Image (cartoon, coloured by chain):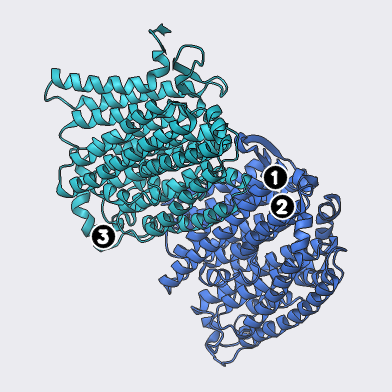
């Protein structure tokens, strides 16, 4: 341990956040030293992220009651600004690997962005923020790292340079500023209510005991949830999602749909831990969470049913899956928080595989994937499996297990109405994903072949090494977890 | 180990056929599928005799174990499923529908078989649910891709209806299972049946029972949740229809026995009048529809609704006789409906459609073997004594007449009377079909060429099922003896 003046710093424990930050600096310095030669940058990014993910998983293997702690303030309270237990470590690994996947998709083939220095550095910065927010336990770090995790992606959307993209970026930026304002307000209210600048269970319990402070605390949580709702694409804060997904390039959309969502959920879990640990009857907070979850699951699925473009469908699918992610949190129990973490990881892997398959086929009309199973076995098979996982249908067992795990805390807490909404959402979800699945299974029509041909010829010429890697690794992870679902849940506890 | 193999052989071969071996030609694909089904049958026999089990940690977070094994209730269903698996695989020599590669078709059949076997052998409630879901996608592929070539829209519609209806049911069941498991603290079906479930407070039992019965009633199907079944049967290819009627519907009734009846007896008891009435309405409704239905395949599907009504009634009665009757009727319906769907599928293949309003030459003249088997199936279906259908219906009505002590006697007696009337109506529609198809309308000297009689593999398949119909009817004792102990445990020992 390096003894600083006031706080202790352990760089090994901080590695999940430090490594991507270091990578971003290396990329920027390298670009200054070797201008013009940039092909090494995304590769360096992936390597750095993989090492950081390994470090995060290593902390994830520690027992729950002995989390890795650093940046600890001196006695008497000895509060630590960085606390990473198994759930945190696994979520960090998820964020880092999802960023690596987005990086691979973004820089895939000849049509990648010109300015890889900026894109790589931005994604690495976002990964730093994500890894930081998952382990943060105080308001300041939480707020700053959460913004660091999400704002670089807004810049990525804007970088696309086309008119529609900048319009999408503007929407996203306005959303993001609103979200930040809400989060800052919520943090201030939290501080007012608890008198504590950290997310600690004991001060929450004390605040809850006092009726006046409880009102402020409920307000604080509601405002914080609204701010996070934007980042998680929860209804009614979801409106930016379809536009941003369809105007941004696929790599950026994958970053928004993957790493960004895990980061936002990790931030939510930090609040959730404080509330669940307080062991008070936080029913009113549960109602707010439950309402958000129910509205997202229903509206997301209903809208996804009508989409004809692959990225728009994936955007609405994100909205509905975000509802599923928040559903177990509404129970506000330790089991519920773990269930939510498990769900978001499964969702992310499946969604990234879907994005990779879309990257191979080319974004645009859903019809373009018709008969993909016969044309391209790897992309078609991986996409089909990912859709089954998202729908929660065997053989995508892990998707089904994730839904079972997510429903258990809600049923345990007696949230019957929410459980019934979830039943409807399961069925709507099956309709959504099977519609696409049926298209993959169908015979390619001659018209479609002609339509897809110019793209197909270009696609054949352009190697999809990044997308292929994401397809193979992602599907491998999904299959492994489908056979041994205990593995994923074991990583979280 | 043997139990795991029993599940893995059809599952792995089926998955391989739909993925890696998709391009296999029909001759090799059906050989592979038949070999897998044969091995599964052999394993099923070994499992029946040796009764091995497997129990490994699988999902510690939910304390779900990879726990499979068989008891008296599961054994007949495992054997039935394995037998039907062999028959549908053999039927590939008679007919492989278009719509995709033959290997995909056969692979889907095997995966459905694996899912059904896993459902019947699962000893953990959550595992049961996952196995229950396994059949959805392959069955959906069978209906919506390999179904009736005439009407693409109807095919898509039937496929969607099947998967969405049953998904509503199974997810409701999941909520019920989770409510049960989280309150009882264990998901082991044995422990739940031995008293962990019965110890729950009364209103929680009722809630669990409502969710489970409602969810499983979709799969059975119990009136008025049956509307997905007729289109699914009408559209599905012959082998798919057979699996659907003989195996998939049994998963619903088996689930009713395993979950609400065995684990929350008091809650189920309070719910049973509703189930009994729904069952009886199903019996009469199904029979009435059969009296006017034009499509023979749809007619058999509605008769399934009526037969499943008898099973629901018997289960609702709550006595040991009732449970025995339900289990027997379950198996009997599996054999009879398999026979009828193979027959009707064969007729549809020969005639192009099975519309009863089209005048056709007499089946007894053009193809006497088919004609005989049709009469046998119809007679068994209407519950003629001496054939398999009789005992299930007879005991069901008897059980409703003398229900368990805590059931409202008057209501159940009323149900018994109406059910008996429904059984009489069944005679009406069976004779209607016999009249139009077997006796025929149109004398045609060249008819024999249009309806070639059954031979070869098809004859063997039909003969096996026909023989079983007779054997079960003449000698119901052995089957009743197999289920007796487990039934006594569930109705008596569990409380």
In this orientation, does residue B384 appear? no
Say which of marks 2 and 3 sits in front: 2
Marks 2/1 in contact by CB < 8 Å: the verdict is yes
Q: Position of residue A267 (x, y in %)?
A: 42, 34
Residue with the mark numbered 2:
B204
In the orientation shown, which residue stands out farthest toward the front? A212
Identify residue for label 1.
B183
Single out the mark in the foreground, 3 or 1. Answer: 1
Residue B68 at x, y percent in the picture: 68, 43
- In screen coordinates, is A409 left or right of A143? right
Q: Which residue is mark 3?
A: A448
For label 1, the SS is helix
Quarter of the rendering containing residue A186? top left
Q: Position of residue B149 (x, y in %)?
A: 43, 71
Marks 2/3 same chain? no
State the separation of the CA atoms marked 2 and 1. Answer: 8 Å
Q: Position of residue A366 (x, y in %)?
A: 31, 56
Which chain is painted in cyan? A
**Any part of residue A189 in sight:** yes
Shown in blue, the chain is B
How crowded is the residue under tag 3: few (<14 C-alpha within 10 Å), some, or many (20+)?
A: some
Q: Residue at x 54, y 45 (%)?
A: A284
Labelled pair 2, 3 in contact (Cβ < 8 Å): no
**Quarter of the image where one finds residue A441:** bottom left
Q: Nearer the viewer, residue B157 or A374?
A: B157
Circle 3 chain: A
The answer to whether A92 is drawn above or below residue B185 in the figure is above
A56 and B463: which is toward the camera: A56
Tag 3–tag 1 contact (CB < 8 Å): no
């Amino acid at each position: 341990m390096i003894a600083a003046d006031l706080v202790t710093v352990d760089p090994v424990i901080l590695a999940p956040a430090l490594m991507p930050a270091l990578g971003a600096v290396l990329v920027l310095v390298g670009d200054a030293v070797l201008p013009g030669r940039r092909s090494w940058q995304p590769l360096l990014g992936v390597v750095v992220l993989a090492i950081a993910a390994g470090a995060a998983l290593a902390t994830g293997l520690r027992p729950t009651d002995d989390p890795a702690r650093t940046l600890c303030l001196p006695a008497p309270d000895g509060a630590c600004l960085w606390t990473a237990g198994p759930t945190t470590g696994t979520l960090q690994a998820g964020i880092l690997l999802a960023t690596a996947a987005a990086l691979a998709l973004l820089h895939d083939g000849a049509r990648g962005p010109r300015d890889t220095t900026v894109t790589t550095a931005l994604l690495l910065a976002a990964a730093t923020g994500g890894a930081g927010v998952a382990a943060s336990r105080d308001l300041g770090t939480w707020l700053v790292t959460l913004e660091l995790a999400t704002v670089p992606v807004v810049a990525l959307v804007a970088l696309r340079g086309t008119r529609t993209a900048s319009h999408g970026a503007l929407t996203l930026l306005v959303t993001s500023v609103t979200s930040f304002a809400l989060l800052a307000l919520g943090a201030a209210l939290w501080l007012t209510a608890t008198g504590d600048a950290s997310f600690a269970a004991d001060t929450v319990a004390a605040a809850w005991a006092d009726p006046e402070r409880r009102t402020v605390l409920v307000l604080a949580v509601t405002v914080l949830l609204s701010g996070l709702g934007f980042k998680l694409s929860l209804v009614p804060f979801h409106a930016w999602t379809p536009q941003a997904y369809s105007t941004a390039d696929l790599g950026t959309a994958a970053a928004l749909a993957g790493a960004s969502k895990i980061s936002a959920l990790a931030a939510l879990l930090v609040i959730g831990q404080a509330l669940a640990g307080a062991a008070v009857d936080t029913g009113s907070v549960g109602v707010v969470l439950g309402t958000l979850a129910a509205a997202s699951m229903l509206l997301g699925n209903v809208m996804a049913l009508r989409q004809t473009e692959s990225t728009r469908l994936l955007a609405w699918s994100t909205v509905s899956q975000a509802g599923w992610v928040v559903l177990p949190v509404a129970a506000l129990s330790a089991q519920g928080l773990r269930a939510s973490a498990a769900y978001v990881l499964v969702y992310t892997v499946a969604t990234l595989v879907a994005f990779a398959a879309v990257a191979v086929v080319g974004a645009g009309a859903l019809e373009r994937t018709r008969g993909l199973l016969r044309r391209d076995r790897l992309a078609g098979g991986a996409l089909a499996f990912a859709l089954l996982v998202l729908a929660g249908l065997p053989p995508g067992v892990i998707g089904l297990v994730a839904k079972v795990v997510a429903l258990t805390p809600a049923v345990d807490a007696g949230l019957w109405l929410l459980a019934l909404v979830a039943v409807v959402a399961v069925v709507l979800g099956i309709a959504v994903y099977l519609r696409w699945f049926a298209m993959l299974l169908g015979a390619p029509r001659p018209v479609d072949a002609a339509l897809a041909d110019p793209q197909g010829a270009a696609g054949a010429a352009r190697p999809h090494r990044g997308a292929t890697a994401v397809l193979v690794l992602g599907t491998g992870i999904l299959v492994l977890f489908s056979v041994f679902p205990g593995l994923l849940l074991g990583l979280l506890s | 180990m043997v139990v795991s193999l029993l599940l893995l052989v059809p599952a792995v071969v089926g998955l391989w056929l739909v993925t890696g071996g998709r391009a296999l030609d029909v001759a090799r694909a059906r050989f592979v599928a038949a070999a897998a089904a044969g091995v599964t049958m052999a394993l099923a026999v070994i499992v029946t005799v040796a009764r091995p089990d497997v129990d490994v940690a699988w999902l510690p977070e939910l304390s779900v174990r990879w726990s499979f094994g068989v008891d008296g209730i599961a054994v007949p269903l495992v054997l039935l499923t394995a037998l039907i698996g062999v028959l549908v695989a053999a039927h590939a020599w008679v007919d492989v529908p278009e719509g995709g590669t033959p290997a995909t078709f056969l692979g889907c059949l095997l995966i459905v078989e694996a899912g059904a076997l896993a459902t019947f052998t699962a000893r953990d409630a959550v595992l049961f649910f996952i196995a229950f879901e396994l059949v959805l996608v392959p069955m959906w592929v069978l209906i919506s891709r390999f179904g009736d070539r005439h009407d693409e829209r109807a095919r898509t519609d039937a496929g969607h209806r099947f998967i969405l209806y049953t998904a509503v049911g199974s997810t409701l069941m999941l909520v019920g299972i989770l409510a049960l498991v989280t309150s009882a603290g264990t998901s082991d079906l044995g422990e739940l049946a031995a008293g962990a479930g019965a110890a729950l407070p009364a209103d929680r039992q009722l809630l669990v029972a409502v969710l489970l019965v409602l969810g499983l009633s979709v799969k059975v199907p119990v009136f008025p949740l049956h509307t997905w079944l007729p289109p699914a049967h009408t559209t599905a290819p012959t082998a798919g229809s057979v699996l659907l009627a003989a195996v998939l519907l049994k998963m619903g009734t088996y689930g009713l026995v395993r979950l609400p009846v065995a684990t929350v007896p008091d809650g189920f008891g309070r719910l049973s009048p509703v189930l009994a009435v729904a069952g009886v309405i199903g019996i009469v409704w199904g029979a009435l529809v059969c009296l006017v239905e034009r499509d023979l395949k749809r007619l058999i599907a509605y008769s399934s609704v009526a037969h499943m009504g008898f099973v629901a009634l018997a289960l609702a009665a709550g006595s040991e006789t009732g449970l025995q009757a339900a289990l027997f009727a379950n198996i009997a319906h599996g054999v009879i409906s398999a026979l009828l769907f193979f027959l009707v599928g064969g007729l549809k293949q020969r005639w192009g459609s099975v519309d009863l309003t089209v005048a056709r030459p007499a089946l007894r003249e053009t193809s006497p073997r088919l004609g005989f088997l049709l009469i046998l199936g119809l007679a068994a279906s209407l519950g003629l004594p001496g054939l398999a259908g009789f005992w299930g219906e007879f005991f069901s009505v008897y059980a409703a007449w003398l229900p368990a002590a805590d059931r409202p006697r008057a209501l159940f007696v009323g149900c018994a009377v109406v059910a008996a009337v429904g059984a009489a109506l069944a005679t009406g529609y069976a004779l209607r079909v016999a009249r139009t198809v077997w006796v025929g309308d149109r004398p045609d000297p060249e008819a024999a060429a249009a309806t070639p009689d059954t031979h070869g593999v098809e004859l063997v398949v039909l003969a096996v099922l026909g023989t079983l119909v007779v054997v079960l009817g003449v000698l119901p004792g052995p089957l009743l003896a197999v289920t007796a102990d487990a039934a006594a445990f569930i109705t008596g020992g569990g409380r």
